[in-house]
Amino acid sequence: QVQLVESGGGLVQAGGSLRLSCAASGRTFSNYAVGWFRQAPGKEREFVAAISRGGGSTYYADSVKGRFTISRDNGENAVYLRMNSLKPEDAAVYYCAADMPRSGALLTKIHEFGYWGQGTQVTVSS
């Protein structure tokens, strides 16, 4: 079992940047693929970015490609989401999620993740 805690959210102006952190504790974190998801009020939770266990593979939603960067430091048991050029439509609660992939390197779908953090709020003012 792994526990996840997100941090780094806040209020930022459009065009600004934030870096979210996901701190993991519990079992060997390097065994887990990780994803970031977000959920805006009245909308379904959606995929944002994913990273493989070793960090060598990443994948992004089209809406954030070129603006967001996911990375991880297994020595620090942490995953990060660097968000640049933020837009008002990026405002949401951001969640990190983890699980051990049964096949392939990346997990991108909500049902593939068994472990979730509590979320961190990102607000973008226009």
Image (cartoon, helix red, strand yellow):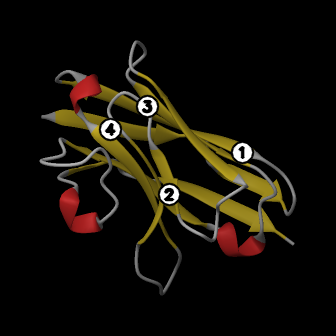
Q: Position of residue 12 (x, y in %)?
A: 79, 55
Q: Which residue is at 16% across, 49% downward?
A: 103
Q: Name which residue type carries label 1.
A: Leu
Q: Quadrant of residue 82?
A: top right
Q: Name which residue type carries label 4.
A: Leu
Separation of disc 1 and disc 3 at Cα? 20 Å
Q: Which residue is at 60% across, 70% downward?
A: 62
Disc 1 packing (10 Å; few <14; some 14–19; many ≥20): some
Q: Position of residue 108 (x, y in %)?
A: 34, 60
What residue is pinned by disc 3?
55
Disc 4 packing (10 Å; few <14; some 14–19; many ≥20): many
Mark 2: secondary structure: strand
Disc 3 packing (10 Å; few <14; some 14–19; many ≥20): some
What residue is pinned by disc 2?
94
Q: Which residue is at 30% across, 65% downward?
A: 109
Asked if disc 4 and disc 2 are in contact, CB closer than 8 Å, the reply is no
Looking at the image, is mark 3 or mark 2 earlier in the sequence?
Answer: 3
